[in-house]
Amino acid sequence: MSELVTGEAVALELRPAKLPSRALAVLIDLIVAVLVYVAVVLGLVAATSSLDDAAQAALSVAVFLLVLVGGPIAVETLSHGRSLGKLAFGLRVVRDDGGPVRFRHALVRGGVGMVEILMTFGVVACIASLVSARGRRLGDVFAGTLVVRERIPVGRAGVAPPVPPELAGRFGELDLSAVPDGLWLAVRQYLSRMHQLQPQISWSMASRLAADVAARTGAVVPPDLQARPDAFLAAVVHERQARQTQRPQYGAAGAGADSVTVTPTPAPAVEQAPGRVEGGSGSRPTGFAPPA
């Protein structure tokens, strides 16, 4: 899949999270982190009561950094941007290009978040989110990340255009097994949002997607559809959905065909047996041996 198609398709799907949902998600994460921190501190106080004050203070600082700073970084890295609070509100941290975050992104977000969230009680983060066009705080700006919504209401999503009647079933012989799922996702996202784009950009993206699909299938875009690549994509997606719907029926038919294929055929000795009864349940011909 071409880089332009991938970038545009991902950008169309990204919906930046609003400040209220992000604030509530951070609040849930802080409550969980504080509870864990208090439990760990109480356990350390009971276990290190024999130590002096300096050692206890050093342990307290270490636990603070480990739980309230290292904990969110580890959770965000292992969950690929979905902490407990973000999971509750359907949010996720992704890179600017839509890819999953890694340790360095979580480390930068956590380090800056300690200043703009913990030390300033979230005032700096709120101001930065209100000023940013995509609601990013300083940690997102420095890390190159963005908090997006994963759960989008169905009613607000775009509707794919209908398949022209003359194209229904036209690509029944096309081999779609080599087309990856990522390319299908990009095609569906484009079809559902093609009317939101400028005509020139929409045609360019459709042409690139159609070329990618044709290259994966080993075919070419028909000449009469080269000026309408969106119609070609809609017809191919419709064909794929039709095959997925009919797959159980094909499986049942395949099972029947297998049963017919493995039915034992009479051996050459059957032709010499005089007393054979066709299609009945009577006596079997002489020399008949059941197959292994």
Image (cartoon, rainbow, N blue to C red):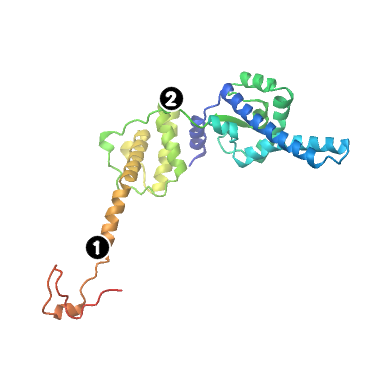
Q: Looking at the image, which is closer to me, 11 or 50?
A: 50
Q: Secondary structure at mark 2?
A: helix
User: Dot 2 corresponds to which residue?
Assistant: 196
Q: Nearer the viewer, residue 40 or 15?
A: 40
Rendered residue at 79%/42% (across/down): 47
Instruction: Give the amino acid type for the residue marked by disc 1 in the picture.
Output: Val
Who is closer to the viewer here, 139 or 75? 75
Q: What is the distance, in whole Å, between disc 1 and disc 2 at their CAs?
A: 53 Å
Q: Nearer the viewer, mark 1 or mark 2?
A: 1
Q: Is residue 69 left or right of residue 154?
A: right
The residue sitting at 41% across, 43% down in the picture is: 213
| Residue 224 image-quadrant placement | top left
Whichever of callouts 1 and 2 sits on the residue coming sooner in the sequence is 2
Provide the residue designation for mark 1.
Answer: 260
Residue type at mark 2? Answer: Gln
| Residue 139: x %, y % from top left | 67, 29
